[in-house]
Image (spheres, rainbow, N blue to C red):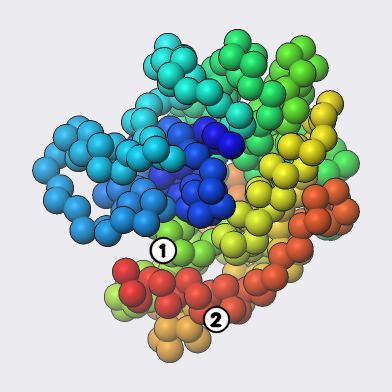
Amino acid sequence: MTYLITGGSGFIGSHLVERLLKNGHSVINIDNFDDFYAYPIKVKNTLESVGKSTEFEYINKDSDLQNLAAQTRSDDYSLYVQDIRDKEGLKSIFSMHTIDFVIHLAALAGVRPSIERPLEYQEVNIRGTMNLWELCAEFGVKKCICASSSSVYGNNTKIPFAETDPVDHPISPYAATKRSGEILGHVYHHLYHIDMIQLRFFTVYGPRQRPDLAIHKFTKLISENQEIPFYGDGTTARDYTYIDDIIDGILKSADYLQRHSHIYEIINLGESEVIQLTEMLSAIEQALNKKAIKKLLPLQPGDVQQTNADISKAKNLIGYKPTTNFQNGIKKFVEWFLRK
């Protein structure tokens, strides 16, 4: 089967590409190597995902990405450096391949940056996503998984968060774009009979995690004896989900879509284990055997107080069963961080 993966050189995407290739599938990776974080990180992710050495001679971004695409190309894998806002560029890729399944992970991510760049988030996360669905309709691609986010729940007071909860009050542009994607996805399902699952990810972490995210940032700063930004009183809490469990949920969702028709579903993928900020920091300190130097700061606009996934639907519908508790996940992440 041929999968088109958007954002396949990112954190989640590169792990997904790696698993799909190991499972004998073909993968088309579309990633624009956005400057949200340094592109050499995504180069390394890409090389690791296709089982190649991460030794790479860097010259400049344009030539590096051309070399990367050539170096990784095989009968089962193609990399295209492509922005999803460019519909004609996307169309040329759809024209060159017979695509069985689209898994759409590419997005501008992050709550705080979205407050500073709301229009850009709209262009990528809404318009870019619609470009993909337009092409799915045009080229007859009938199976699609999209990455949504736990941020759509906002400051939901009902715990845990269930897919049936009202999500009409987002508190960041990022969250609003993800909720818009869910609604528009249903339109394309209804009009063009695209079977679709929208996966609401809950704070994914693990090897290759983006360096701007809290666990990676805290680990780096503590290891370097630098201050960490500690927002609020430490009682904010997240349902942290280890990368292996997220990939398992994506693959189980793909299998469900392959076996069923006339499907539109929204599904939570979390660990169903709530960890406070103080607990998260303590786990990293223990894994590093180092104490953090905290810089106390007020809560940031757009940050939610707590996330907690009700994963009963995922368990019942697709057989999702997360297996990595937070303490073990942090140990694995820190081991990876110290090796890289």
Residue in the picture at 65% in, 44% down = 149
Q: Which mark is residue 217?
A: 1
Q: Which mark is residue 282?
A: 2
Q: Quadrant of residue 325?
A: bottom right
Q: Given contact means CB atoms under 8 Å apart, are the residues at marks 2 and 1 in contact?
A: no
Q: Which mark is residue 200?
A: none
Where does the N terminus fall, quadrant-wise?
top right
Residue in front for this viewpoint, 222 or 1:
1
- On the image, the x and y values in percent for residue 129 come to 57, 24
The amino acid type, in three-letter code, at marker 2 is Ser
79 lies above or below 95:
below
87 lies above or below 254:
above
Residue in the picture at 42% in, 77% down = 335
Question: Upstream in the sequence, badge 2 or badge 1?
Answer: 1
Residue in front for this viewpoint, 173 or 99:
99
The amino acid type, in three-letter code, at marker 1 is Lys
101 lies above or below 276:
above
Residue in the picture at 61% in, 54% down = 247
Kindly state the secondary structure of the residue where label 2 is placed: helix
- On the image, the x and y values in percent for residue 8 come to 46, 42
